[in-house]
Amino acid sequence: TKAYRKSRGKELAVDSTFEFEKRRNRPVKYDRNLMGKTIMAMQRVQNIKERREERFHANRMKDAKAEKVSQARVEIEKHAELLAPAVAKREEVMQNVLDSARARIATRRVAKEKVVARGAGGEQKMEE
C-alpha cells in the first residue's frame, strides 16, 4: 500500500511540490492571464516533481546494483558445476568457429592465387 511504501522509504514522502497539489477552497474570478500562468506553473511543478522522483529512485537503486552483483557471484559459486559443461561447450564452439574461419581464408587465398596466375599467364601470351 501507499502508506507502507512511504513508511519504508520506498516512495518520496516529504516534498514541497506536494503543497501545490492541495485543494484550495477559494473561488477566483476568471482571468485569462492568471489561468495561463497557473497552467505554466503546474507544468513546471510537475517537471520538478518528476526529476526529484527520478533522483530519489536513482539514490535508492545505487546500492542495489552492488548487492545484485554480489548475489550473482554467490549464486555462481554455489552452482559452478552447472556452468562447467557450458564453458566446455563454449570452447568447442569457439574452436569450430576458428577452424571454419581458417578454412575460408585458405580457400580465398587459393582463389586469389589462381586469379593472379591466370592474369600472369595472359600477360605472357600477349608479350609473345
Image (tube, rainbow, N blue to C red):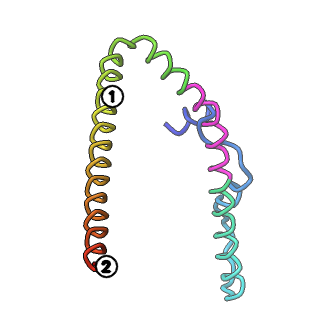
Please provide percent x and percent y for residue 79.
38, 13
Closer-to-camera residue (87/47): 87
Judge the density around disc 2: few (<14), some (14-19), many (≥20) Cα neighbours within 10 Å.
few
Based on the displayed image, in which of its 4 quarters is residue 100 positioned?
top left
Based on the displayed image, in which of its 4 quarters is residue 93 positioned?
top left
Judge the density around disc 1: few (<14), some (14-19), many (≥20) Cα neighbours within 10 Å.
few
Q: Which residue is mark 2?
A: 127
Closer-to-camera residue (4/115): 115
Q: Secondary structure at mark 1?
A: helix
Q: Main secondary structure of the magenta part?
A: helix
Residue 117 shown in magenta? no
Q: Secondary structure at mark 2?
A: helix
Based on the displayed image, in which of its 4 quarters is residue 37 positioned?
bottom right
**Label 1 is placed on what type of residue?**
Arg
Does 19 appear above or below 127?
above
Residue depth check, mark 1 versus mark 2: number of the one nearer the observer: 2
Q: Viewed as shown, does residue 49 lie left or right of 92?
A: right
Q: Which residue is mark 1?
A: 90
Q: What's the residue at 32%, 16% (across, down)?
A: 82
Q: What's the residue at 63%, 63% (across, down)?
A: 46
For the C terminus, give its image quadrant: bottom left
Outermost bottom residue: 32
Q: What's the residue at 66%, 75% (across, down)?
A: 27
- Choose the circle earlier in sequence order: 1 or 2: 1
Segment colored magenta: 52-67
Please provide percent x and percent y for residue 30.
66, 85
Q: Which mark is residue 108?
A: none
Q: What's the residue at 29%, 25% (across, down)?
A: 89
Please provide percent x and percent y for residue 105.
32, 49
